[in-house]
Amino acid sequence: VLADGSWLVVEMHADRGCVTLLDEEGRIERVIARTGRPNGLVVGRDGTLWVAESQERSLVRLSMEGRAETVLTGCEGEPFLFPNDLCFGPDGALYMTDSGLLVEEWSPGGEIREDFMEAQTDGRVYRIDLDTSEIEKLDSGFRFTNGIAFGPDDNLYVDETLTGMVYRYTWEDGKIVGGREDFANVAYKESTEFPVGPDGMAFGADGNLYVAVHGQGDVTVLSPEGDVVRRIETAGRQPTNVAFGTGGEQRIYVTEVELGRLEAFEVETEGLRLH
């Protein structure tokens, strides 16, 4: 959400492949830019848009006027495979997940492969210093890394779609220390038709984590201890991301792919202030 209550969304379908501006009522106002197959999207403090571009396999800097610039395409000679989601950290750096396989291998012809559970993946988590464009790989070997968020404890939370897991990394003395820890599992349904697992997520000011669970048709709410507090059902089965509204608003907004909608739900907290 932008300061004036309007919204930015990504449209990943091959016919669109764009970053789109919606007005306060949810109507399409204009296309900002067509980048290919944009996935994650965040807005920096200076108004710059940052896009995890999964088709061109890059991190893209984008202005509201539509000027796009490729900033990174890999880390230390290793190319990106499937840039997925983004968030800023307490240190001002940008953190990005890479799902760990190529788009054309994951969804040939635009349809997710039938043997998706057998896909060979090397999901990754990166830290990017935007002042210098230096990039560091923090972890790898995930089975489709996806959503990423910093909590009120400043710890980093990353989810893994194909296992249903949400992991936590400890933040100490201004940096991530140690490896991933199990935090919670949000999946309770199984499907052989399409993946069921966590996608994008966002923290409330109450410390609960709101996780869009793709294929399960809900936003699963996790307590600070990792317990399931609530499951908010979406109209379609494929919610992909969740964001809170403007300051003071106690609503979440959820992108849902099956019906191609942005849905809104009343909750009992406003969003945690983003870094």
Image: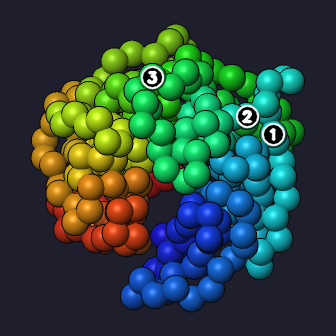
Under mark 2, the amino acid is Phe
Q: Position of residue 78 (x, y in %)?
A: 80, 24
* Quadrant in the picture for residue 95: top right
Which residue is at 51% across, 81% downward?
Answer: 22
Which type of secondary structure does the marked residue at label 2 adopt?
loop
The Cα–Cα distance between marks 2 and 3, rounded to whole angstroms, is 21 Å
| Residue identifier under label 3 | 118
- Comparing 114 with 50, the one in front is 114
Which residue is at 31% across, 23% downward?
Answer: 183
- Comparing 13 with 267, the one in front is 13
* Quadrant in the picture for residue 117: top left
* Quadrant in the picture for residue 244: bottom left
Q: Position of residue 211 (x, y in %)?
A: 32, 45
Q: Are marks 1 and 2 in contact (CB under 8 Å)?
A: yes
Q: Going by the image, does 189 lie left or right of 272?
A: left
Q: Going by the image, does 99 lie left or right of 216?
A: right
| Residue identifier under label 2 | 80
Using the rendered image of the protein, determine whether residue 156 is visible from the camera's viewpoint.
no
Disc with the residue nearer the chain's start (2 vs 3): 2
Which type of secondary structure does the marked residue at label 3 adopt?
helix
Under mark 1, the amino acid is Thr
Disc with the residue nearer the chain's start (1 vs 2): 1
Q: Residues within 10 Å of mark 1 (few under 14, many from 20)?
A: some
Which residue is at 36% across, 39% downward?
Answer: 195
Q: Going by the image, does 225 lie left or right of 246?
A: left
The Cα–Cα distance between marks 3 and 1, rounded to whole angstroms, is 26 Å
| Residue identifier under label 1 | 73
* Colour logic: rainbow
